[in-house]
Structure formats: C-alpha cells, structure tokens
Image: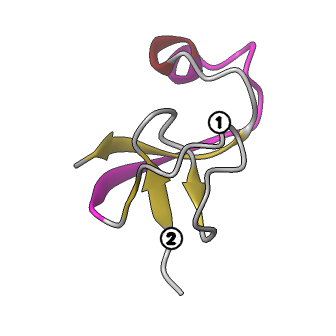
C-alpha cells in the first residue's frame, strides 16, 4: 500500500481518511517530503502552518 497525501493538511498516511483533519481528499501524486520533529523550532513548519509533528508532503497535486 502506498502513501497518500492529504489535500487539506498535506499529512502523509496509508489510510483512506486523514488521521489529522479527517479529510477524504487524498492523493498519491505529491512532491517532496518534510519530517517535522519540533514544531516550535522549525521555520518550514511555521511556513506550512503545521502544528503537529509528523510526515508531510511539500506539494499535493
């Protein structure tokens, strides 16, 4: 089973529903990968408006 990126929050998951925002708008077509460990210290997390640690796609198509 391949990973899918949520179209709303960009979270990566193998499920059919996003565990972060409960959206069903998931895509297997995404680009880039960001792994956030410390939300407060990450400039990328602030720019992407990420509030929880995890794996995120940079771009979801």
Q: Pointers 2 and 1 in contact (CB under 8 A)?
A: no
Q: Secondary structure at mark 1?
A: loop
Q: Which residue is mark 2?
A: 3
Structural crowding at the residue carrying mark 1, measured as other residues with C-alpha within 10 Å and reported as few (<14), some (14–19) or many (≥20): few
Q: Earlier in the sequence, mark 2 or mark 1?
A: 2
Measured as percent of width and height from the top left, residue 61 is found at 22, 49
The answer for how far apart the CA atoms under marks 2 and 1 are is 16 Å
Q: Which residue is mark 1?
A: 21
At x 58%, y 66%, the residue is: 16
Measured as percent of width and height from the top left, residue 5 is found at 45, 54
> Would you place residue 9 above or below residue 56 in this image?
above
> Would you place residue 58 above or below residue 25 in this image?
above
Residue 36 lies in magenta, yes or no?
Answer: yes
- Looking at the rendering, the stretch of residues picked out in magenta corresponds to 29-45
At x 46%, y 64%, the residue is: 4
Q: Secondary structure at mark 2?
A: loop
């Amino acid at each position: 089973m391949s990973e899918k990126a949520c179209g709303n929050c960009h979270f990566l998951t193998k499920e059919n529903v996003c565990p972060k925002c409960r959206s069903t708008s998931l895509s297997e077509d995404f680009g880039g990968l960001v792994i956030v460990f410390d939300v407060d210290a990450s400039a990328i997390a602030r720019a992407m408006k990420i509030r929880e640690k995890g794996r995120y796609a940079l771009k979801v198509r």
